[in-house]
Image (spheres, rainbow, N blue to C red):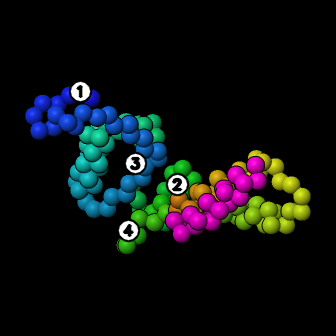
Amino acid sequence: REACEGPFAAATSRLHLYVDDAVAAFRGSPDSIIESFDVMLFLCLVLGAPVAWPKVSLVTAGGDSPSRWIGVDFDLTSGGARMRLPEAFLSELAMQLDELMQCRGNLTDTAINQICGRAARVAFVVPAAGPFAAALRAALEDSR
């Protein structure tokens, strides 16, 4: 934030960093998990990224039930972390998309916005769905 002396004199700058709902999964011994978590927090502090402590959720994975965070189910497999959307969410989205495809008149702006938001949520978990979510949002914007 202030001018630096020496070789970094030209590096005066300001960093505005905003991270929304970041997720991290760690696997290993309790000591290695704690160390990895500490390193991640240290990186956030070094970069000046504020941590929203009320939203921090530490969950021990295991058993048959995944951990749900911000509407996404997380669990650890032998291959790493897995993210899945809840069945109820997918069923509601499928019903809304069926309604959209059968609509002969107008749908409310609220309903279309909700569909676009849900499609974006699918694209967060399944990146290959990104172009489809973007096309829905573009169609909504064009219709306005």
Residue farthest to the right, as pictured: 105
Q: Tell me which segment is drawn in magenta.
A: 126-144
Disc 1 to disc 3, C-alpha distance? 36 Å
Q: Which circle marks residue 51 in the picture?
A: none
- The three-letter amino acid code for the residue at tag 1 is Glu
Mark 2 vs mark 1, foreground winner is 1
Q: Earlier in the sequence, mark 2 or mark 3?
A: 3
Mark 4 vs mark 2, foreground winner is 4
State the residue position of label 1.
Answer: 2
Q: Earlier in the sequence, mark 4 or mark 2?
A: 2
The percent position of residue 107, horizontal first and vertical second, equals: 83, 54
Quadrant in the rendering for residue 84: bottom right
Disc 4 to disc 2, C-alpha distance? 17 Å
Above-or-below relation of 78 to 67: below
Q: Secondary structure at mark 3?
A: loop
Judging depth in this view, the residue of 9 and 45 nearest the camera is 9
Judging depth in this view, the residue of 134 and 28 nearest the camera is 134
Q: Is residue 6 magenta?
A: no
State the residue position of label 2.
Answer: 68
Q: Residue at x 41, y 65 (%)?
A: 81
- The three-letter amino acid code for the residue at tag 4 is Gly
Disc 1 to disc 4, C-alpha distance? 42 Å
Residue farthest to the front, as pictured: 10
Mark 3 vs mark 4, foreground winner is 4
The quarter in which the N terminus is drawn is: top left
Above-or-below relation of 59 to 11: below
Q: Which circle marks residue 80 in the picture?
A: 4
Disc 3 to disc 4, C-alpha distance? 17 Å
State the residue position of label 3.
Answer: 58
Disc 2 to disc 1, C-alpha distance? 42 Å
Q: Is residue 86 visible?
A: no
Q: Is residue 54 left or right of residue 138?
A: left
